[in-house]
């Protein structure tokens, strides 16, 4: 230990604190955004608004979970939005024919299939996850379009239970929390406390080291991508309950924000670092930001520019702060 | 030596596959000839430029996810400025959008260098920004391309039994790519681009300025992107602010063309041949009157299988 380490500069000390507690930084940022919103439009921040924000942040946070988990191993899941869209579309078109329970099972089958293909490509063929999941996403979209031709006559109904879950409220809070809170707790515990979670970090930090320590990396990849696809499928079911209109590009607008939420949340796209708690706050930040931009009545073009600029600025600032000291 | 051989072998294999596909096309549609070839090449132009741009950045060890969005910006800018323009003004517009492409690319590169964030993150965020810029310039498809400039990529180079088989667009593509690529490949900058993609630390220790080289690579990609955006506007005749499906196709063609994601290896010929292979597969499926949606599935599957096979071969190669 040198003198410098004993007496770090204030900036370095703050940097170290923030690196050890990334969620705190993000919560401060979130609070600032909410404050800005309140200043711009006094009185907007109330119980109803909070409920709405949480409601829209939950599907985003679930899709971002796919990105967080895959990014821990240095990957990414760009097929997540397609999987979510397929699940949503299948459940709504199968509902009139086979009933809710079976429709949900049927809707998650394509998710498992896509997850298996992703796992095969990444784990066994060693294809870069970005390419693999882009490819399966493209194939999935094609299949969905062909499927749509087949069911064009049956019409679509969003199951009442999903609608309750997606849009309903109990005591002012969205019902989706019933699904999301256990999901988040399990995921957080699984990341830190289970063998599988630790294997993800191990592979992301140094795959060769993990392999030499006896980890069968391909099995982990299979499990990871199937899990990611299943989460995406469930997120799609929740999202269709929220939007109430299945379409062929339902979850597509959530894909880039889901990557952004994970990155803002402090997950390293190179693997080995990150936590789901940061991602949840990241999803909240993006949702609030979206409200803010809508409120300012920005034209669509300017909104996208600001959105992109802020993602870049926040990520850069955040990386700079946490790398110090 | 072995590596050079296997790389050339890969490109040769691709050329063989391309010829095979052309023969198959001729068998499916006996009337396939000059005009069919011409429309395939013209349709492939934007994909080819997008692929070339992606290849340059990937060789330098990065990846640019904002290629399609930047093409949209160039396309709408050109369409807006060219509407009712005379000869001089049209050439000025062409020069201006090429400069615009270089500037956008350089900005991408500068941001990657300045923020020290992964290329994927920066260019993903910038793709939002460029999409927004395109929408601000033109809210809906509009503007117009100068008619006589459109003729530059339309039709065969000359009437005649053999020369009519060569479309103008192919000549334009070849000349423009060679103008950018050949001087680059032979220059110090080109070598530096391969060097930072192969091993940034080693390149730095050999005196290569990593930041400047990276910005230059992105800027060159930006010029190629501008050519792609121009070719979209010229072939459709109007500016379209929503990015086309060029990003994914470009990445696929780059991988299929033997450029290693991660950088340092590969050239431009392989990816360009790969673009034509993917386009002709699409044409064949259409000629076989396959449902266009099924065509998308087949195309995606081919892409995925090719990259998976490439992956397996790479793993084998490493073990051997």
Image (cartoon, coloured by chain):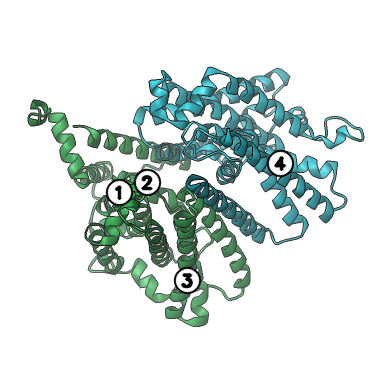
Does residue A85 appear left or right of residue A261 in this picture?
A: right
C-alpha span from label 2 to label 4: 40 Å
Residue to which mark 3 is pinned: A109
Dot 3: chain letter: A
C-alpha span from label 1 to label 4: 47 Å
Residue to which mark 1 is pinned: A282
- Pointer 3 or 1: first along the chain: 3
Relative depth, front residue between A20 and A317 = A20
Q: Residue at x 48, y 77 (%)?
A: A95
C-alpha span from label 3 to label 4: 39 Å
Describe the element under mark 2 as helix, strand or loop: helix
Q: Looking at the image, is B144 positioned above or below residue A85?
A: above
Dot 2: chain letter: A
Residue to which mark 4 is pinned: B15
C-alpha span from label 2 to label 3: 27 Å
Describe the element under mark 1 as helix, strand or loop: helix
Q: Residue at x 50, y 54 (%)?
A: A125
Disc 2 vs disc 3: Cβ atoms closer than 8 Å?
Answer: no
User: From the image, which quarter does the N terminus of chain B lie in?
Assistant: top right
Q: Residues within 10 Å of mark 4 (few under 14, many from 20)?
A: some
Q: Are marks 2 and 1 on the same chain?
A: yes
Residue to which mark 2 is pinned: A260
Does residue A262 appear left or right of residue B89 in this picture?
A: left
Identify the disc placed on residue B88: none
Q: Colour of chain A?
A: green
Disc 2 vs disc 1: Cβ atoms closer than 8 Å?
Answer: yes
User: Which chain is represented by cyan in the image?
Assistant: B
Residue A60 on image: x %, y %: 36, 56
């Amino acid at each position: 230990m040198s003198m410098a380490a004993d007496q770090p500069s204030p900036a370095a000390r703050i940097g170290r604190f923030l690196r050890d507690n990334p969620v705190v930084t993000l919560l401060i940022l979130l609070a600032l955004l909410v404050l800005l919103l309140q200043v711009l439009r006094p009185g907007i921040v109330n119980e109803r608004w909070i409920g709405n924000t949480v409601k829209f942040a939950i599907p985003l946070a679930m899709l971002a979970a796919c990105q967080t988990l895959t990014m821990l191993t240095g990957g990414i899941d760009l097929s997540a939005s397609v999987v979510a869209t397929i699940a949503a579309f299948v459940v709504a078109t199968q509902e009139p024919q086979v009933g809710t329970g079976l429709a949900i099972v049927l809707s998650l089958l394509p998710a498992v299939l896509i997850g298996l293909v992703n796992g095969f490509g990444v784990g066994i063929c060693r294809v870069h996850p970005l390419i693999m999941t882009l490819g399966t996403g493209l194939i999935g979209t094609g299949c969905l379009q062909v499927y749509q031709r087949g069911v064009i006559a049956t019409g679509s109904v969003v199951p009442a239970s999903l609608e309750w879950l997606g849009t309903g409220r109990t005591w002012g809070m969205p019902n989706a929390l019933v699904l999301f809170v256990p999901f988040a707790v399990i995921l957080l515990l699984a990341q830190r406390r289970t063998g599988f979670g630790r294997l993800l970090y191990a592979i992301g930090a140094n795959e060769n080291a993990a392999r030499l320590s006896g980890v069968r990396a391909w099995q982990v990849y299979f499990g990871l991508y199937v899990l990611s696809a299943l989460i995406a499928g469930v997120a799609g079911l929740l999202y269709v309950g929220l939007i109430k209109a299945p379409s062929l590009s339902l979850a597509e607008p959530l894909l880039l924000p889901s990557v952004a939420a994970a990155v803002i949340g402090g997950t390293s796209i190179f693997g080995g670092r990150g936590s789901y708690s940061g991602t949840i706050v990241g999803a909240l930040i993006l949702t609030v930001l979206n409200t803010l931009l809508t409120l300012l009545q920005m034209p669509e073009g300017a909104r996208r520019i600001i959105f992109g600029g802020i993602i870049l600025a926040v990520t850069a600032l955040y990386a700079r702060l946490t790398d110090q000291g | 030596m072995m590596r050079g051989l296997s790389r050339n072998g890969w490109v040769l294999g691709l050329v063989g596959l391309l010829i095979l596909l052309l023969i198959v096309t001729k068998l499916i549609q006996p009337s396939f000839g000059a005009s069919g070839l011409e429309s395939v090449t013209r349709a492939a132009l934007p994909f080819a430029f997008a692929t070339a741009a992606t290849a340059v950045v990937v060789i330098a060890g990065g990846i640019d996810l904002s290629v399609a969005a930047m093409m949209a910006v160039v396309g709408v800018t050109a369409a807006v400025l060219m509407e009712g323009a005379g000869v001089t003004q049209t050439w000025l517009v062409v020069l201006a959008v090429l400069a615009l492409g270089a500037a956008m690319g350089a900005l991408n590169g500068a941001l990657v260098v300045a923020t020290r964030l992964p290329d994927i993150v920066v260019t993903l965020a910038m793709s939002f920004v460029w999409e927004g810029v395109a929408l601000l310039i033109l809210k809906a498809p509009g503007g117009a391309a100068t008619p006589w400039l459109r003729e530059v990529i339309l039709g065969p180079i000359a009437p005649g039994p053999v020369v009519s088989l060569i479309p103008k667009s192919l000549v334009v593509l070849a000349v423009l790519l060679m103008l950018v690529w050949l001087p680059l490949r032979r220059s110090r900058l080109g070598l530096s681009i391969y060097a930072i993609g192969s091993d940034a630390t080693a390149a730095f220790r050999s005196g290569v300025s990593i930041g400047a080289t990276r910005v230059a690579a992105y800027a060159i990609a930006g010029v190629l992107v501008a050519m792609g955006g121009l070719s979209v506007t010229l072939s459709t005749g109007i500016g379209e602010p929503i990015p086309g499906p060029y990003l994914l196709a470009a990445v696929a063609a780059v991988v299929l063309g033997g450029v290693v994601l991660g950088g340092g290896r590969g050239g431009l010929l392989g990816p360009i041949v790969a673009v034509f292979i993917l386009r002709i597969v699409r044409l064949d499926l259409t000629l076989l009157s396959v449902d266009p949606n099924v065509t998308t599935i087949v195309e995606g599957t081919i892409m995925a299988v090719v990259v998976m096979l490439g992956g397996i071969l790479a793993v084998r190669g490493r073990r051997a």
